[in-house]
Image: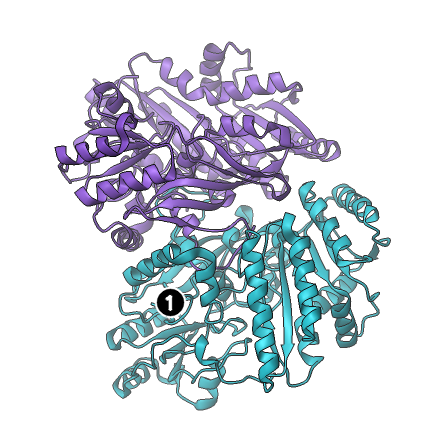
Chain colours: A cyan, B purple
């Protein structure tokens, strides 16, 4: 994907901060070959899956233990150098960019499962393990970790961005599924934010303060997360609809009836075409819902029948079932590749990805108005969504060398966010703020709430070394 | 209930802070008859359902609007006088006590439902509405608010203490069920912490920072909470067991199998005797589980059969069903009155209430060791628990005039907490820290985490006027 230089208005005002040679020398002395200043390594750690660019970090430390992370942060604190935690590199909003300079702390080698408490439905892991690695490691327990943001993200990164994905409608987001964290603070101290108890009223909820803080309040070095029994029965189905509205109304009624559907994804007709082309599928090129039901065989049957009845009322076709695990995997992989299918459909394009989420009652209005606006603009786009949560993603595919398209794309994105906020929604359901959505955050919460965030940031990171320049300008 | 003076070691070190006459005059000028300095009113607002005492606040402001709260806090900030929010007065850990002096802000008159969004399964309320008032107000929507801490607490207070109760095993706690808050900050500014979107990754999770902050970071003036469709079918059942262990093993296996049981409460044999005497019930005086199942008729039947099978393996008797709503209400009222049944069984006693919560795999060990210890002490007690969450309450019923009993009771409480922490649990599942559990919090989280809480407190309330002397000593 073509990645243009960062638009000036997206970069926080602060210039690059000095990274003294003596600091790099101290890092090398402590970390030896775990510290790299090779350009290729630095460049790889200075970007994410988004399209914004910044100069790479000055060095990368490959942490292997919590103490490594703590020591690196202590050195950085001493020299007042920014540190940016790096997991799998799959974030989308510029979270990993060294916009004020500094170093990257890569926790990818910290990818072990530390303890499985199958009887308690919890697991404690290091931050660098990815969700797929985690599920592979626990596959013999009869349990699984459901949160599925599409990318094979690291658990630490998923905590840091408050990730969710296709299963959140049933199992919640990282907000609901993290029990406790070990965190390295801005001074390099190591704290624990909770216990393995399922609930607690013991003081401030530091766990949920760190979840979603995007590396700006502490570096996550361990996470205890919830697991779930693998459902006895799983069924996936596709249902095509005559219109987006019909599909969305089906979802709204399903949620309002309290059907515990495990996944329900909308793909609009032209995105189905892109996905068909990219993943060699033969899906009917109409708006469709891709659904999954989990439970006992009787419960799955009951859920599916209820939703089929609702879909029928709105003109949905008969469900097409994906009965084998392989068929299900193929469908979900195709869904997760919608982003790439979109981007590859227009070679050289830049994708402006959006992430709005609205109360479910406003979902149809929000989607239909946004589709009409996108169609009128002439900008190609794709549209997918975790519609059971009211969360959806337009990807506007612009030619980055065409100033008119860039302006149109940004205008679409702004208009979409304004519409979602008007409807009681949020500018980001799951991707986080990073660099890209700082203005939107302010628009969403107002100055007072962002001032409260700033006060917390200043209190916990007085030297502003933890991933500075993200979420808000200080 | 007899309420002795606060043990000196439980009071934070800070002495009473001055409340200048000029400040009281300013309050009167702004609030007129909404401000009272009558001793009876002040005394009523200077205590909670716990047993610790402190001098009453100097005045009580009866707020009727968010602006009232903001104006009262602005005046308090100007004079550096502590403010303590007051809802229904049902907290247990000394949350409402004016341990450093100051005024009480009673939000009981702010008890309106502001908007019901039935299609979104959300409601926005003022903080003084109680959970029963809320459910009464929305009864025609087909929805309900499940969180049920026993007491008819205010929603604002339930947010402030991160309350939960009998339904939490299925529906979660206030942590999971608050979408957004309106909050008056220490400077008297009004902020909103979230939107009505079901999920969000937009900046720090201020909602969950305020939930459980016990009035020390801001005063809640509005709350948007989740509602649920009233289940199509509800069944309640009692099952008696030959031992506590048999009952608990049944619960553990039920949870581990993923049965979505809505309530599962343990009552030990002697507490059944107390409850029988207090509520005129004829329950079999053996350890029992009081359960409730929610869902479609087929799902409820399936759940109940599964649990009956598990109970049978552990020697449980046949389920006795409470089929009518009246019978269910009678049983749950009896359960909620267990505390009063216990306290009234020993006239003049003081109850040391505990609130530990452990990972479910350790629940049987923790309970059995704690029962053995309590039996050996000779101190009368009651034992009830939201055992599906690993949360349970011993109430040690001591004679407050007997130094030996006081010492034994405190020793039991300390030993219970130490045991729970050893097992990966927490000192408070749902009551909060208040005054009483400050030492336990430190023991649970360590200095580092409490230092982080202190840093947040100092940043957001630099004059330390918001319910000072609670959760931790500054």
Percent of width and height locating residue B168: 52, 37
- Give A121 or B168, whichever is nearer the viewer: B168
- What residue is at 26 percent from the left and 51 percent from the top? B454
Residue farthest to the right?
A: A318
Percent of width and height locating residue B447: 26, 52
Percent of width and height locating residue A243: 79, 58
Relative horizontal placement of residue B280, taking residue A217 as reference (left or right):
right
Relative horizontal placement of residue A352, taking residue B26 as reference (left or right):
right
Residue A192 visible, this angle: no
Quadrant location of residue A445? bottom left
Determine whether A35 is above or below A133 in the image.
Answer: below
Q: Quadrant of the N terminus of chain B?
A: top left
- What residue is at 82 percent from the left and 46 percent from the top? A313
Residue A109 visible, this angle: yes
Label 1 sits on residue:
A66
Quadrant location of residue A474? bottom left
Determine whether B42 is above or below B169 in the image.
Answer: above
- Give B105 or A340, whichever is nearer the viewer: B105
Label 1 packing within 10 angstroms: few (<14), some (14-19), many (20+): many
Looking at the rendered structure, the secondary structure element under dot 1 is: helix
User: Could you tell me which chain the residue with mark 1 belongs to?
Assistant: A
Relative horizontal placement of residue B175, taking residue A418 as reference (left or right):
left
- What residue is at 64 percent from the left and 67 percent from the top? A394
Percent of width and height locating residue A138: 59, 59
- What residue is at 62 percent from the left and 66 percent from the top? A150
State how many labels appear. 1
Quadrant location of residue A448? bottom left
């Amino acid at each position: 994907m073509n990645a243009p230089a960062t638009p000036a208005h997206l970069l926080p005002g602060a210039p690059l901060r000095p990274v003294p040679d003596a600091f790099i020398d101290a890092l090398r002395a402590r970390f030896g070959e775990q510290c790299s200043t090779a350009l290729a390594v630095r460049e790889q750690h200075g970007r994410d899956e988004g399209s914004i660019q910044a100069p790479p970090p000055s060095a990368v430390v490959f942490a292997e233990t919590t103490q490594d992370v703590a020591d690196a942060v202590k050195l950085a604190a001493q020299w007042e150098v920014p540190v940016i935690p790096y997991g799998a590199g799959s974030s989308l909003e510029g979270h990993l960019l060294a916009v004020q300079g500094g170093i990257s702390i890569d926790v990818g080698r910290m990818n072990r499962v530390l303890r499985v408490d199958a009887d308690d439905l919890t697991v404690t892991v290091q931050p660098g393990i990815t969700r797929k690695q985690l599920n592979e490691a626990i596959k013999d327990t009869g349990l699984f970790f459901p949160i599925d943001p599409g990318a094979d993200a690291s658990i630490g990164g998923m905590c840091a961005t408050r990730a969710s994905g296709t299963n959140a409608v049933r199992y919640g987001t990282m907000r609901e599924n993290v029990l406790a964290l070990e965190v390295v603070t801005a001074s390099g101290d190591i704290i624990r934010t909770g216990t393995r108890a399922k609930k607690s009223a013991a003081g401030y909820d530091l766990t949920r303060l760190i979840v979603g803080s995007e590396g700006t309040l502490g570096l996550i070095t361990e996470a205890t997360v919830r697991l779930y029994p693998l459902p006895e029965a799983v069924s996936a189905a596709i249902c095509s609809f005559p219109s987006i509205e019909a599909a969305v109304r089906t979802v709204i009624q399903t949620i309002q009836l309290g059907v515990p559907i495990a996944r329900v994804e909308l793909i609009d007709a032209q995105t189905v075409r892109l996905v068909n082309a990219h993943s060699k599928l033969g899906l009917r090129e109409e708006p469709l819902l891709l659904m999954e039901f989990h439970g006992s065989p009787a419960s799955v049957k009951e859920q599916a029948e209820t939703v089929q009845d609702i879909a029928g009322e709105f003109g949905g076709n008969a469900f097409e079932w994906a009965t084998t695990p392989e068929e299900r995997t193929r469908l979900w992989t195709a869904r997760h590749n919608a982003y790439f299918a979109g981007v590859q459909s227009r070679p050289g394009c830049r994708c402006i990805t959006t992430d709005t989420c609205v109360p479910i009652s406003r979902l149809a209005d929000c989607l239909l108005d946004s589709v009409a606006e996108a169609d009128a603009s002439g900008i190609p786009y794709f549209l997918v969504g975790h519609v059971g949560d009211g969360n959806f993603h337009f990807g506007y595919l612009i030619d980055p060398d065409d100033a008119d398209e860039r302006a149109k794309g940004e205008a679409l994105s702004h208009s979409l966010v304004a519409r979602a906020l008007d409807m009681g929604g949020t500018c980001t359901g799951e991707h986080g703020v990073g660099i890209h959505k700082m203005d939107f955050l302010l628009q969403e919460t107002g100055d007072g709430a962002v001032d409260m965030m700033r006060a917390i940031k200043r209190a916990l990171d007085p030297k502003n070394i933890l991933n500075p320049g993200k979420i808000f300008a200080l």
